[in-house]
């Protein structure tokens, strides 16, 4: 094996070859990247290159004693330590003694430490001592999938090379070259299936290819490969997604039967479905070129973005991921699967809370305008937000908007009749349950936050509300949606108030400094809660 034999990592191999040629070899190397993409192979080739007796053309000869011994794993100058096996305690302890001695036959003593992030704290310390003052004949080559777990003191003493996840093309080309060498016939599609299944890992691709060869013998056919790898086609997932989006329960149950009866494993199916949804999400975020997805599905997604949005996909993925993590504890996976997909089908399509609240005050007539966005081509009479202005309609729309802004009330149809009751706390308290009910219909979370709050007083048009639930997130959420709450209040009662939330002064003033559960206020967490319209349960 030579440097050029490592697929997809030229940025690493060229740099290493240059360093050797220019005699600028470092004492510590760190190879990082996902599993199965050539880190250990590169480490061994580097070791051979450094100790080869006939190094030429920027590559080890592969046939001298040193090369052969390294290939066979019996070189006493090149030691491989697996950080994962016993966390390296003994080896690293021995290492500190052993590095003092000169190499036996090669130029260097080379330590290849795989999964170096698994080393214990003591092992890292021992390693650091050697790395701080490495004897000139000692070289460390470390490999890891988790560079963030490696102490900075070690990182700063190594040259780091980030190996890239392999692209499907890289893998397909490499597998193709193997099959050609073996004289086996194949088509590109089957190799893509293998590459996709291995998710960028060359090692996994090779072992899958072995399975396929063992099964197919001389001719590698797509249908057999799908069978062997248990791959479910995108078209099938697409049918499921369509049934979910159309809430077609009947079709869903029939599809599930087909899938389960044809022998696909449920975990395999679930993983595949989530991978499919992820690809759909990429398409809806203009990243179509990043994923391999059937053209029919792509067109369908782009044409139906009002029945399946990015937010819908995110919610589905979220629900399926939760299901996946519970799957192995489930006694009746088939029933659970059916329930899961029916639940997805029963899910309302997602609407951004902000959009929904913003639409609350608008007239009913404007609602369908948004909905029909992509149906514009078929129904020409419907004015759409981004259609070119037709003759009379836009004026009307413009006027509606203007009215809405400047005049107090252009009176939507569903507007409750103006009440003659005097506005006081008693009146507001009487109407409050109805306001809460309306809020609950629109945004359960906000209604939940308002639950148990107390109407304190009402003076000068201002309604003071004492909150019951007053963690930082609750207060911020309510403040953010305050104008929407006021709007709903106006719709229900026919009168307007300004709302002021009061929370326990002790908690709000010192809340920030309070050490209790600081992670609840973490911006990322708040963002997640916002996106999924969730709440903290515990
Ligand atoms: Zn050699």
Image (cartoon, helix red, strand yellow):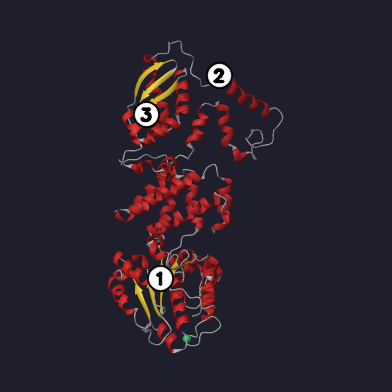
The reply to whether dot 2 and dot 1 touch (C-beta < 8 Å) is no
- On screen, residue 395 above or below 98: above
- 21 or 321, which lies in front? 21
Q: Residue 264 carries which label?
A: none
The reply to whether dot 3 and dot 2 touch (C-beta < 8 Å) is no
Q: How far apart are marks 2 and 1 (CA)?
A: 71 Å
Q: Nearer the N terminus, badge 2 or badge 1?
A: 1
The residue where tag 1 is placed is 142
The residue where tag 3 is placed is 450
Element assignment for label 1: strand
The residue where tag 2 is placed is 409
Name which quarter of the figure residue 328 lies in.
Answer: bottom left
Q: Where is residue 333 in the image (x, y as percent from the top left)?
A: 34, 54
Which of pointers 2 and 1 indicates the residue nearer the eye?
A: 1
Q: Which residue is drawn at 35% across and 21% down?
A: 455
Q: How far apart are marks 1 and 3 (CA)?
A: 55 Å
Which of pointers 3 and 2 indicates the residue nearer the eye?
A: 3
Residue at disc 1, CB closer than 8 Å to ligand 1: no
Q: Is residue 276 visible?
A: yes
Q: Residue at x 47, y 35 (%)?
A: 353
Q: Distance between the residues labelled 3 and 2?
A: 27 Å
Q: Nearer the N terminus, badge 1 or badge 3?
A: 1
- 385 or 108, which lies in front? 108
Q: What residue occupies the far right of the structure in this picture?
A: 391
Q: Where is residue 496 in the image (x, y as percent from the top left)?
A: 47, 19
Q: Nearer the N terminus, badge 3 or badge 2?
A: 2
Name which quarter of the figure residue 516 lies in.
Answer: top left
Element assignment for label 2: loop
Q: Position of residue 524 (x, y in %)?
A: 42, 45
């Amino acid at each position: 094996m030579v440097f050029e034999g490592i697929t997809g990592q030229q940025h690493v191999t060229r740099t290493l070859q240059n360093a050797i040629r220019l005699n600028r070899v470092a004492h510590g190397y760190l190879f990082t990247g996902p599993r199965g993409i050539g880190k250990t192979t590169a480490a061994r080739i580097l070791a051979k290159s450094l100790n080869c007796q006939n190094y030429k053309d920027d590559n080890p000869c592969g046939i001298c004693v040193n090369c052969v011994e390294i290939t066979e794993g019996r070189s006493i100058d090149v030691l491989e330590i697996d950080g994962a096996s016993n966390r390296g305690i003994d080896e690293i302890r021995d290492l500190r003694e052993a590095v003092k001695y000169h190499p036996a036959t090669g130029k260097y003593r080379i330590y290849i430490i795989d999964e170096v992030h698994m080393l214990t704290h003591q092992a890292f310390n021992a390693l650091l001592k050697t790395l701080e003052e490495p004897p000139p004949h000692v070289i460390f080559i470390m490999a890891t999938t988790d560079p963030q777990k490696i102490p900075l003191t070690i990182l700063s003493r190594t040259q780091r090379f980030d190996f890239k996840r392999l692209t499907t093309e890289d893998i397909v080309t490499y597998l193709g070259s193997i099959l050609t060498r073996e004289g086996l016939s194949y088509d590109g599609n089957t190799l893509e299936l293998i590459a996709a299944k291995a998710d960028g890992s060359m090692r996994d691709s090779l072992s899958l290819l072995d399975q396929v060869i063992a099964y197919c013998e001389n001719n590698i056919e797509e249908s057999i490969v799908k069978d062997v790898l248990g791959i479910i086609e995108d078209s099938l997932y697409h049918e499921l997604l369509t049934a979910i989006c159309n809430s077609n329960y009947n079709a869903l149950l029939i599809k599930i039967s087909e899938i389960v009866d044809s022998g696909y494993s449920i975990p395999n199916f679930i993983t595949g479905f989530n991978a499919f949804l992820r690809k759909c999400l990429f398409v809806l975020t203009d990243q179509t070129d990043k994923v391999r997805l059937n053209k029919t599905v792509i067109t369908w997604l782009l044409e139906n973005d009002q029945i399946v949005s990015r937010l819908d996909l995110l919610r589905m993925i979220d629900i399926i991921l939760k299901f996946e993590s519970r799957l192995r504890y489930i006694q009746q996976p088939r029933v659970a699967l059916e329930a899961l997909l029916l639940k997805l089908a029963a899910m309302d399509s997602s609407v951004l809370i902000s959009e929904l609240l913003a639409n609350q005050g608008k007239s009913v007539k404007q609602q369908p305008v948004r909905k029909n966005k992509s149906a514009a081509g078929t129904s020409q009479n419907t004015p759409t937000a981004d259609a070119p202005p037709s003759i009379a309609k836009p004026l009307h729309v413009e006027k509606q908007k203007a009215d809405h802004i400047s005049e107090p009330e252009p009176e939507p149809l569903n507007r409750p009749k103006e009440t003659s009751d005097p506005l006081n706390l008693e009146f507001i308290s009487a109407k409050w349950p109805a306001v809460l009910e309306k809020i609950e219909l629109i945004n359960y979370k906000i209604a939940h936050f308002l639950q148990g709050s107390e109407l304190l007083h009402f003076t000068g048009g201002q309604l003071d509300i004492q909150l019951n639930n007053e963690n930082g997130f609750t207060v911020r959420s309510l403040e953010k949606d305050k104008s929407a709450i006021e709007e709903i209040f106006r719709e229900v009662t026919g009168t307007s108030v300004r709302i002021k939330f009061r929370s326990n002064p002790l908690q709000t003033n010192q809340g920030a400094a309070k050490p209790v559960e600081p992670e609840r206020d973490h911006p990322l967490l708040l963002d997640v809660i916002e996106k999924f319209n969730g709440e903290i349960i515990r």
